[in-house]
Amino acid sequence: MNKNPNNKYFKIIVFIFIIGFTLSGFKSAEYKIEPLQTGEIATGIYAVNDKFVNMFVIRDGESYLVIDAGSDANNIKSELQKLKIEPDKVVAVLLTHTHHDHTAAINLFKNARIYLSDKEIEAKNGEKPKVLTLAKDTYKNEFSFVTDQQIIHFKKTTVKALFTPGHTPGSTCYLVNDQYLFVGDAFSLNDDKKIDKPNKIYSKDMNAAIQSFGKINNLAHARYIFTAHTGYSGDYKNAIKTELK
């Protein structure tokens, strides 16, 4: 078999290997995967189940924002149909980071601007990532690089970017309308629905991740915390009553 990286069959084999390795890594790290089922969680906030990960959708008037973009574009499209959400009405994709299981369906959202930390670009500019990362030049979307504490205004929604490095150099949490905190893989929730560290195998700097907890544990009006793989908590104040070591 031709193992030229440009060979599409070779790429498919490599992709399958990486996804399999990723899942085995989750298991070996005792990382309990509990993605939410597709549906509305709070008013105007929807979970989209994509096998072992959640994408989240936020209604913004007649349009939508999404947090991350899942691991399988076909599955995301099917799940959005269940919610009667048209991909063309998505105006923004807010990436918590650029690992493949958070970016696969970006091409569905042709009218969306992509928001992410510029620190995530380091992984594709010479640094070896642990899993696949975003290849910016494969998308026709407009990109905006967010800064820490930046507030992004949409029609009826405000989003505040909070840099929480550790899982990746540019891991970013998004606080929506001061109430809904989306953390991606920067943090997880344990069985007691308390904030916990990210997956240790796929996190670049666990010390940085622990320090980043200080960025999200004192949000005055927060009510919900949503993670990518371990569900959510509707009791922010209880979830932050913990110490990461």
Image (cartoon, helix red, strand yellow):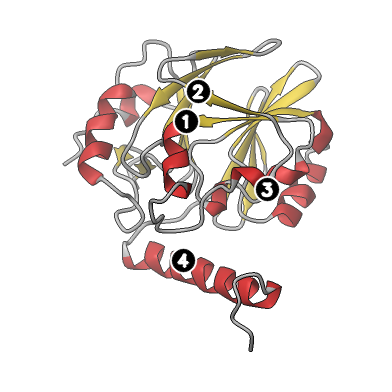
Distance, label 2 to label 3, CA atoms, is 20 Å
Residue marked by disc 1: 117
* Circle 1 residues within 10 Å: few <14, some 14–19, many ≥20: many
Mark-to-mark CA distance, 3 and 1: 18 Å
Depicted 142 relative to depicted 140: above or below: above
Pick out the residue farthest to the bottom. 1
Residue found 58% across the figure and 72% down from its top: 16
Query: What is the spatial separation of the Cα atoms under label 4 and label 1, in whole angstroms?
Result: 26 Å
Q: Which badge, 4 or 1, is on the more N-terminal residue? A: 4
Label 3 CA crowd tier, 10 Å (few <14, some 14–19, many 20+): few
How far apart marks 4 and 3 lie (CA) works out to 25 Å
Whether tag 1 and tag 2 are in contact, CB under 8 A, the answer is: yes
- The amino acid type, in three-letter code, at marker 4 is Leu
Work out whether mark 2 precedes mark 4 in sequence or the reverse, and give the earlier one: 4
| Residue at x 55%, y 53% (from the top left corner) | 100
Q: Is residue 138 above or below residue 238?
A: below
Marker disc for residue 138: 3
Where disc 2 sits, the SS reads strand
Q: Which x, y percent locates residue 215? A: 31, 23
Q: Is residue 208 above or below residue 152?
A: below
Q: Nearer the viewer, mark 2 or mark 3?
A: 3
Q: Residue at x 36, y 39 (%)?
A: 169
Residue kind at label 2, given as amino acid type: Val
Residue identifier under label 2: 146
Q: Tell me which label, 1 or 2, sits earlier in the chain.
A: 1
